[in-house]
Amino acid sequence: MGPVGRLLRILSLALITAGLVVVADIVTTLVWKEPVSTVYGSIQQGKAEDQLAELESEFPARSDLREVEHLDGVRRKVEALAGLFAKRVRTGEAIGRLRIPRIDLDVVAVQGTDTASLQKGPGHYPETPFPGQRGTSAFAGHRTTYLAPFRHLDELQRGDEIEVEMPYANFAYEVEKTRVVDDSDVDIIHRVGYERLVLTACHPLYSAAQRIAAFARLTEVSFFAIGDRKWYDP
């Protein structure tokens, strides 16, 4: 085989290898999640874990507890703490944890739904209240990239539990329904007559043409104090 033949053979092998890599990437994305962004998302989620641990050690501080101790009842205290918390949070910062047993999800959530924030984990819509404040709290998440936390959102069923753990309280929600909506439908995060959680993601998979939304109703609020910060029973 001459020099030209060897060169063509090397080039052919390189193209075949590149093609196999592309096919493997596509197959991996179809059956699981996009691998490159998943690695990056895992690193960012690890940083968010550390940030949340630090946040939980700082909030609520004694001064925060003193500010709300005159209020009657767990719900009023939690609502006031949520308001104090909202004033301190910045875009991209870890804010709490989402747990959904049905889809085996346990992930740190961040503030904001911009591109950079959603690369770290599910993001809280900044135009909606935090859990514990009156209204609809909403979070968005990816389905195929950056750990794809909401990939199986469509598998949620009526009655499934969703837990949202914030530094100031824990919130239990019960899924009411899931619904596919237009990507421009902002009514789904509007206030209703009860405290509600809405989780949204692109739909169908690998497309941003629509949104799938899961709606859940608040069923329980509890506060688990740490150390000497305890000031009322859950």
Image (cartoon, helix red, strand yellow):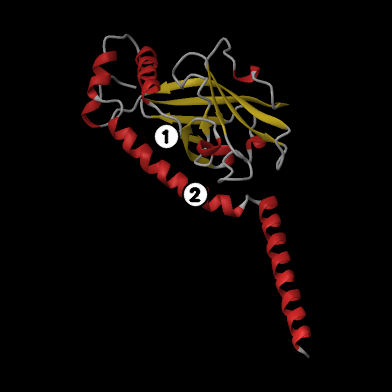
Q: Which quadrant: the C terminus? A: top left
- The location of residue 35, given as percent across then percent down, is 60, 54
Q: Which quadrant: the N terminus? A: bottom right
Which residue is the site of mark 2? Answer: 42
- The location of residue 191, given as percent across then percent down, is 57, 13
- The location of residue 207, given as percent across then percent down, is 72, 39
**Of the image marks 1 and 2, the number of the one nearer the N terminus:** 2
Gap in Å between the C-alphas at discs 1 and 2? 16 Å
Helix, strand or loop under label 1: loop
Which residue is the site of mark 1? Answer: 93
Frontmost residue, 31 versus 16: 16
Which residue is rendered at x = 74% and y = 87% of the image? Answer: 3
Helix, strand or loop under label 2: helix
What is the crowding at mark 2: few (fewer than 14 residues within 10 Å), some, or many (at least 20)? some
Which residue is rendered at x = 41% and y = 45% of the image? Answer: 47
What is the crowding at mark 1: few (fewer than 14 residues within 10 Å), some, or many (at least 20)? some
